Image (cartoon, grey):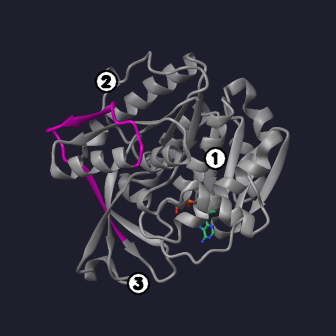
Amino acid sequence: MSRLYAIGEVLIDFIPLQKGCALKDVTAFERAPGGAPANVAAAVAKYGAPSSLLTKLGSDAFGDFLLEELQNAGVDTQHVLRTSEANTGLAFVSLKENGERDFSFYRNPSADLLLSETEIDGNLFEAGDILHFGSVDLVDSPMKQAHRKAIHAVKAAGGLVSFDPNVRLPLWSDAESCRRAILEFLPKAHLIKISDEELEFITGISDIETAISSLFRGDVQAVVYTRGSEGAELYTKNGRYTAPGFKVQAQDTTGAGDAFVGGFLFHLLKREAAPDRLTDILDNYHEEILHFANASGALTTTNKGAISALPDTAAIEALMKSQQLTS
Ligand code: ATP
């Protein structure tokens, strides 16, 4: 089967033991492995496709912990490098009563931002592989250059590029730098995943249909628009496909978007969706792909954390069956 390569951030999310508390008042936290690309890599591995992470960890105890957790999640870590030049990234997350959250990040810089282009093997990728990335490691850093090289290399090999902008404004000096970086990398991707909260920020357009149309630029063939508990919509140049969300008791929405992407990309890997087949595959199999991805995202909200909250395939199938949807 084709392989997922996720590139970018891996960190520890410190989740408060108390819910509905301002971050400054939290007295105790629980650690959970996280970072969007790491979460996506873990989801793909959990669902049964080969999955590797391209990143760097500090030579510290937190780095040791993350390496072990990634390996326990089934992620191939042979391309996870270590450095003593920076610490492993940390994020403190405050959970509001409704399960939504705010972040406080510690990375000045974190080790992942130090992965350089010379550390990316240009011959790593094969046709049908998928490279997935987000925006938080596109701040000016060696890692930004590493992204450029990996994107170029996977495309040269006939692979697919997937981008989840995953806007986290506290990580940027200002909103405009974040938007500029996203708009630079967006046309390089074949598949874009965007949430309802991000669409207007990135495009500057309030009408949803017009905003989504404006994302079809460069190599973009498909846009997945996720809408939290409402589910998701998939746009290709041939159509728009809607899939309702699953009803679950949300506890913590951390990682729901990544679990959704992991479920979505797992189906593309299973079908060896090279760029010249992507639109056809999405037009033909949108229903089962979206339902699986929605169920993956929904179940992840029912537990704390991101990687630690990922469901297994049996739980996803049971949820789809219980709401009359099968894969
Ligand atoms: P994240 O919170 O990880 O940043 P996101 O903002 O990228 O997520 P969302 O649209 O919030 O993306 O969620 C992604 C998917 O997860 C949704 O399309 C849906 O399938 C599922 N999901 C998220 N929240 C819920 C919920 N409360 N109930 C059911 N499903 C949910």
Write down the residue under mark 1. Answer: 264
Q: Is residue 284 left or right of residue 271?
A: right
Q: Residues within 10 Å of mark 3 (few under 14, many from 20)?
A: some
Question: In the rendering, at what x and y percent does residue 171 appear?
Answer: 36, 54
Q: Residues within 10 Å of mark 1 (few under 14, many from 20)?
A: many
Mark 3 — residue?
Answer: 20
Q: Residue at x 16, y 42 (%)?
A: 59
Q: Is residue 14 visible?
A: yes
Q: Is residue 58 above or below residue 257?
A: above
Q: Are marks 3 and 1 in contact (CB under 8 Å)?
A: no
Q: Amino acid at mark 3?
A: Gly
Labels 3 and 2: the sequence-earlier one: 3
Q: Which residues are magenta?
A: 73-93
At x 35%, y 83%, the residue is 21
Q: Nearer the viewer, residue 93 or 180?
A: 93
| Residue that protrudes farthest toward the right in the picture | 238
Residue 283 lies in what quarter of the image? top right
Residue type for callout 2: Glu
Instruction: List the residue tagged with mark 2.
Output: 119
Identify the image quadrant of the N terminus.
Answer: top right
Q: Position of residue 43 (x, y in %)?
A: 51, 49
